């Protein structure tokens, strides 16, 4: 128990440290530290609509982050959430635009299922390569992510482009308002119940089912799991599928929620930030919920800050990078001490 | 030069250590160990796992600084915890695990790791070969200078470790369990080499596990128990084997009494496992199988003897369902299982003690309870409800581990915190639980100390008496002779001979080396 507390504390210290480091850099560049801090607080919590905005950004981070947690439990590093998210959104959009006249609940259900299917497929391909041929999933899921982004770009600029659009960036037509499950804020009871339910289900799956335990064994030592009769390949495919499904679901929620239409390159970092969210959440479900809210707040602040200070949005993205960097270093160190090669490296 | 007089050599031992003490946190690894090793002799150091043998060897070799005590080599005090100083004083160590880099050629590996002076930083391959030719030739066998380390058989690697150790003109050689990975024939070779080194005046301290090996090579013996020197150094001729094993194990402990019951099967002889003409393809690490026929009935232990690397791993993998059977058929409990996956075979009562307990038998970083309950994760769930009670899993795991006397503090601790003997008990507590029909045990006692070895052997015997069938794969002939009701010998991926007790060591040995077809 104390070990768990220690890990939580050291991660919290890391996040705070990254924040200070970022502020230091901003201070050196001539911004006023007080303004930056108060801007962050306002943008994430106190300003009008800020806390709603925090939750709005936390939702996709949480859904994709939970997928990362699932993958990690079985020893796989699925960092392609971005592409799976895009593909999910695209498929939900296709269903919704193609069946405009359909009854709303049915269209939303079909669109969501299509999104889940698309995310799953986008994740299963690298998963299959990994399980069957041992191809490094970090590379393949990342590459699939770029492909996903290009597919989105093609669709929004080509077949699904809104011909009457006037914006600078290509975007699709809007889905009918009756298909929306939230207003423009992106938060509603339905969405909160859905996301909360998913989080509970994922927790139960990981911590209270035999499949969850089998995943843990495969993640810790696939050789031993195989000797115990566990089909490590099948467990691996299932985790890839689940983690892609969650990212796809996030895409559908984005479309039926705050988005209503798809814009080329929307939410460009959410899939990657979700990986950091999962790591900061110590690869547990509860931790990921907390981290998602934290990073949702940051995202909200990033959008708000230019309003109160002259700080450009990328300045706070620096903070993401900083946290990701430090958390990854820490994670590597822990992995080296406890992971498969630990004994060999110690002696 | 004249030979040193008896009194002179007695006056200056090759190695003298006084009241060495080493502790790791709360664990006292060595306490007040004082030991004199007279020069030009072979001294054995024995004791159970965790008795402090390796720690003592490390202190002498300068790899571990003791908290108390001193070490003198040839009468001169040396700085402690200093590998260089130990080397300069003429002391060299052969480690438990091979230390030569696998991807290097023999000459390169020696040049890199040996403490011999005079090498240049830029070299031509031919120069290297010249530099190391004599040393390698001395160990006998074919010239291997250009061969890569990883392509060499284990016994050659072991010999090279000694070549490396002696290259810096060492006069004292420490060997930490050098026989653990060797076949009986290679062990004999090693001992011959050690004796010839001894005849050249090298003082040797060798850490050993088996009393038979001690008797075969050592002239004097010392016993460590719980970090204390409890016997010796005594002349081998002056101590009996019984005295030795008493010293090693200590006052009779009742902790290891009979536990674990096999299934209460009927007395009838059932064929539990049957392989008919089984062949499978070779893997990167192991020979394939060629037309294996074998049968394990209830109430019997069938031994598989053989020099390691003759297909035993493929055999166990094929039975486990981890290597596909290319030809032939396999039956488990009378039902065809040729195409069944590992899970189906497990569910039919196949239990496995794999070769490598730390990588195949347990998940080192996973908690004990999860390791213990791994077999509950396959097959259909007994109830409809998909959620499980972790408390129940943990409680049942704790009960099973207590029954098998696994020593642990908390069910949640990682399995890597257990000692080798305890890991094996953990594995047995899982595999020998009710539901077992037939057990395949691969090297179940390798690397275990005396009491753990006895415990495992007794468990196998009780299992058999309880009605189960056991296939015992081992490279330890004594173990096979002691336990097996029948004995098969593998050579080149085939079963080349079958024996019934009483066994003829010579005949079995011939079959193992392929002298008999």
Image (cartoon, rainbow, N blue to C red):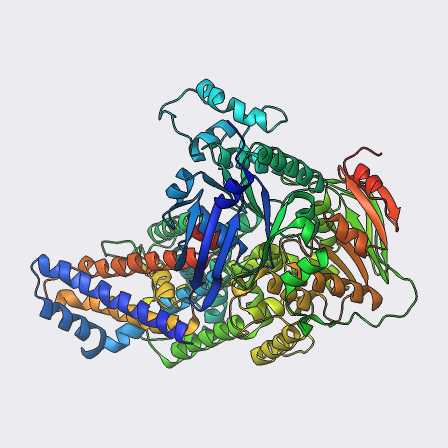
Residue B192 position, x and y percent, is: 65, 35
Q: Is residue A194 left or right of residue B454?
A: left
Would you say residue A200 is visible in this rendering? yes
Of B311 and A29, which appears nearest the observer?
A: B311
Task: Please state the horizontal and vertical placement of residue B344, each as a whole percent of the image.
Answer: 73, 61
Compared across the picture, whether B200 is left or right of B256 comes to left
Side of B53 relative to A346 (left or right): right
Pick the quarter of the image with the C terminus of chain B.
Answer: top right
What count of labels does the image hold?
A: 0
Q: Position of residue B421 (x, y in %)?
A: 62, 62
Answer with the quarter of the image where residue B243 lies: bottom right
Q: Visible in this render: residue A141?
A: no
Give the quadrant of residue B424: bottom right
Quarter assignment of residue A57 = bottom left
Up-down: is B84 above or below B227? above
Q: Is residue B26 above or below residue B205?
A: below
């Amino acid at each position: 128990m104390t070990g768990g507390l220690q890990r939580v504390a050291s991660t919290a210290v890391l996040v705070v440290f990254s924040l200070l480091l970022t502020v230091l850099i901003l201070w050196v560049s001539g911004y006023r530290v007080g303004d930056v801090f108060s801007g962050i607080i306002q943008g994430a919590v106190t300003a009008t609509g800020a806390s709603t905005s925090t939750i709005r950004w936390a939702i996709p981070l949480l859904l994709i982050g939970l997928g990362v947690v699932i993958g990690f439990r079985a020893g796989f590093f699925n960092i392609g959430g971005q592409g799976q998210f895009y593909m999910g959104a695209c498929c939900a959009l296709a269903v919704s635009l193609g069946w405009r006249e359909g009854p709303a609940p049915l269209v939303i259900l079909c669109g969501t299922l299509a999104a889940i299917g698309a995310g799953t497929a986008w994740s299963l391909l690298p998963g299959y390569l990994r399980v069957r041929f041992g191809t490094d999933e970090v590379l393949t899921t990342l590459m699939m992510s770029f492909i996903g982004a290009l597919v989105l770009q093609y669709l929004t600029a080509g077949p699904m482009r809104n011909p009457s659009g006037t914006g600078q960036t290509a975007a699709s037509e809007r889905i009918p308002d009756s298909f929306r499950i939230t207003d423009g804020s992106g938060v509603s009871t339905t969405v909160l119940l859905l996301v909360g339910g998913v989080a509970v289900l994922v927790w139960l799956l990981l911590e209270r089912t035999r499949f969850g335990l089998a995943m843990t064994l495969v993640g810790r030592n696939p050789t031993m799991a195989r000797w115990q009769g566990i089909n490590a390949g099948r467990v691996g495919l299932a985790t890839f599928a689940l983690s892609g499904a969650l990212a796809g679901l996030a895409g559908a929620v984005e479309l039926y929620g705050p988005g209503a239409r798809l814009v080329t390159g929307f939410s460009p970092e959410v899939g990657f930030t979700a990986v950091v969210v999962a790591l900061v959440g110590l690869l547990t479900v509860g931790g990921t919920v907390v981290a998602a809210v934290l990073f949702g707040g940051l995202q909200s602040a990033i959008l708000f800050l230019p309003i109160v200070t002259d700080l450009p949005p990328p300045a706070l993205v620096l903070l993401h990078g900083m946290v990701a960097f430090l958390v990854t270093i820490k994670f590597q160190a822990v992995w080296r001490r406890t992971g498969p090669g630990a004994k060999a490296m110690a002696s | 030069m004249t030979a040193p007089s008896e009194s002179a050599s007695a006056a200056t031992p090759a190695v003298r250590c006084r009241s060495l003490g080493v502790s790791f946190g709360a664990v006292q690894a060595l306490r007040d160990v004082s030991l004199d090793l007279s020069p030009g002799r072979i001294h054995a150091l024995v004791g159970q796992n965790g008795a402090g043998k390796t720690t003592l060897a490390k202190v002498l070799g300068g790899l571990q600084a003791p908290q108390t005590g001193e070490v003198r080599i040839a009468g001169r005090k040396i700085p402690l915890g200093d590998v260089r100083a130990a080397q300069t004083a003429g002391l060299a160590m052969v480690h438990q695990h091979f230390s030569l880099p696998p991807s290097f050629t023999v000459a390169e590996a020696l040049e890199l790791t040996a403490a011999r002076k005079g090498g240049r930083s830029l070299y031509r391959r031919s120069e290297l070969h010249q530099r190391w030719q004599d040393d390698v030739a001395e160990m006998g066998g074919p010239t291997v200078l250009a061969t890569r380390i990883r392509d060499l058989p284990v016994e050659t690697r072991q010999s090279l470790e000694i070549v490396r150790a002696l290259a810096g003109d060492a006069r004292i050689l420490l060997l930490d369990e050098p026989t653990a990975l060797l076949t009986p024939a290679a062990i004999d070779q090693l001992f011959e080499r050690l004796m010839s080194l001894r005849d050249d005046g090298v003082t040797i301290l060798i850490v050993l596990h088996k009393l038979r090996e001690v008797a075969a090579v050592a002239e004097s013996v010392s016993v460590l128990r719980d970090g204390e020197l409890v016997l010796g150094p005594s002349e081998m001729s002056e101590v009996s084997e019984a005295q030795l094993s008493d010293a090693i194990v200590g006052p009779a402990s009742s902790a290891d009494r009979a536990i674990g019951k096999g299934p209460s099967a009927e007395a009838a002889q059932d064929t539990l496992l049957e392989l008919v003409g089984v062949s499978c393809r070779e893997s990167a690490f192991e020979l394939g199988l060629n037309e294996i026929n074998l049968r394990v009935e209830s109430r019997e232990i069938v031994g598989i003897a053989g020099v390691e690397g003759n297909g035993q791993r493929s055999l166990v993998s094929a039975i486990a369902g981890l290597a596909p059977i290319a030809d032939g058929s396999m039956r488990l409990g009378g039902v065809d299982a040729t195409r069944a996956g590992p899970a189906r075979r497990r569910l039919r009562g196949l239990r496995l003690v794999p070769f490598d307990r730390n990588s195949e038998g347990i998940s080192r970083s996973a908690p004990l309870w999860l390791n213990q309950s791994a077999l509950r994760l396959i097959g259909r769930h007994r109830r409809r409800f998909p959620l499980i009670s972790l408390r129940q899993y943990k409680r049942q795991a704790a009960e099973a581990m207590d029954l098998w006397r696994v020593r642990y503090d908390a069910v949640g601790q990682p399995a890597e915190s257990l000692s080798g003997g305890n890991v094996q008990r953990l594995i047995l507590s899982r595999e020998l639980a009710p539901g077992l029909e037939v057990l395949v045990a691969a090297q179940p006692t390798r690397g275990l100390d005396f009491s753990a070895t006895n415990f495992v052997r007794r468990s196998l015997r009780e299992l058999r008496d309880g009605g189960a069938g056991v296939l015992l794969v081992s490279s330890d002939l004594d173990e096979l002779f002691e336990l097996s009701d029948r004995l098969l010998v593998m050579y080149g991926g085939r079963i080349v001979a079958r024996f019934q007790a009483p066994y003829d060591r010579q005949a079995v040995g011939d079959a193992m080396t392929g002298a008999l077809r």
